[in-house]
Image (tube, rainbow, N blue to C red):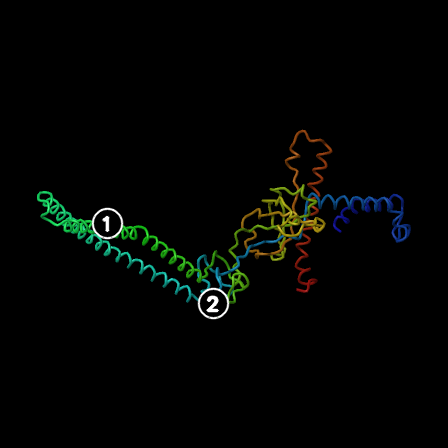
Amino acid sequence: MLELFLCSMLTILPDFLYRRFVQGRRLGHEINLFTVWYELRWGITLCLILTLSLITTVFYFHPSTKAASSVFRTVTILPETNGRVAETFVDLNQRVKEGQPLFRLDSTQQEAAVETAKRKMAEIEAAMVTAKSQLAEAEGRIVQSRGALKQANDELERRMEVQGRSPGSIAEAEVERMRVQFETAQGAVDAALASRDAIESQMEFQLPAEKASAEAALNEAQVALKKTLVVAGTDGLLQQFALRPGDIVNPMLRPAGILVPERPTTGLMAGFGQIEAQVIKEGMIGEVTCIAKPWQIIPMVVIGVQPVVASGQVKSTDTLVDVQQMVRPGSITVIMEPLYQGQLDDLPLGGNCIANLYTSNHEALQDPDIGFWQSIGLHLIDTVGLVHALILRIQALLLPVQTLVFGGH
């Protein structure tokens, strides 16, 4: 409507003035409801053409959208295991800090597992003490069996020496008995050495391995016990937290609530039409007016343009994707920040806004090789941005009235 009014000032009004003061035609006489088209046909035709051209130029080179919002992320509060709530430490809408306890699950089973693992550790430590005593005992048996072996060896050598000097003085059976006694003593020594080696292997390999397994089991039990205490993963505001002792939570089916992190940025995300993809560039200047900040125009700057359109995404499924299902064109996602810091700090998270972007040809106009008509065209493109800026200010002025009066809020 504003474009039509402005264009009529340049076309219909001059045509009417010419008809009125040059040709002498008057409203209500020569110019009436039935003859207005014939009398003002040149002005009306030019007005329609100029209006369509102006609207196309304005909306293409100076994009506008009502889909601008202060987006924010949420963190779902979920325990890592199923369980029954034993105790809660926070309330709804409470601000929490990172690491602050939120609630605790019943930990009877986990505490029993920790106690069992500790008992197993105590058993292994006792076994290591016992193994040291067994090693000392084995060393003593080695000394004892070596002494018996030496005594048997001495007796055997003495009898063999006597028999060698005086054959027949000692019975052959006696010598054979001493030889068997010597071999028995030798076997006792070998058995004592093997027993000692077995105990040393047990102390060096088996018991440390069992101790390491017991420590791992204890750590696992302690981790499971620690998971029963759910803490905040980040600073934020707690929402939809209605847990009470006795409730059952499930990480797959029943979350405990939602944590809204502290505002990481004061920027906006806006969706513009795909037809404006060649115009929207990083660094463009824009303006927004928000419902939560009535009668305010906030200058913005584009800090990022998403290079993909969400409507074309494809997920891995067991069904082939029919491209015709993507009929609805998606939007170009643009990230904007206030030109001056702090201007959107009081905007509620998720607040909706109306956004304009303005094409600037200042650098192109500085080119000394630019042609005359091209310069006129670029000046015209930059100038018609005032129309969109004026429209945004009219929207900002009427937005509270439309929302409160005509919207019924």
Residue at left offset 34%, top offset 53%: 209
Circle 2 Cα neighbour tier, 10 Å, few/some/many (<14 / 14–19 / ≥20): many
Give the residue at mark 2. Answer: 85
Q: Is residue 161 left or right of residue 132?
A: left
Q: Nearer the viewer, residue 9 or 271?
A: 271
Residue at left offset 76%, top offset 47%: 6
The circle on residue 159 is none
The single residue placed furthest to the top in the displayed view is: 369
Residue at left offset 21%, top offset 50%: 189
Give the residue at mark 1. Answer: 190
Q: Is residue 140 left or right of residue 292?
A: left
Where residue 283 sits: x, y (%)? Answer: 60, 42
Q: Nearer the viewer, residue 67 or 59?
A: 67
Of badges 1 and 2, the one in the foreground is 1
Q: Is residue 88 left or right of residue 278?
A: left
Question: Where, by quadrant of the figure, is residue 307 drawn?
Answer: top right
* Sequence order check, earlier mark of 1 and 2: 2
The amino acid pointed to by label 2 is Val
Number of marks drawn: 2
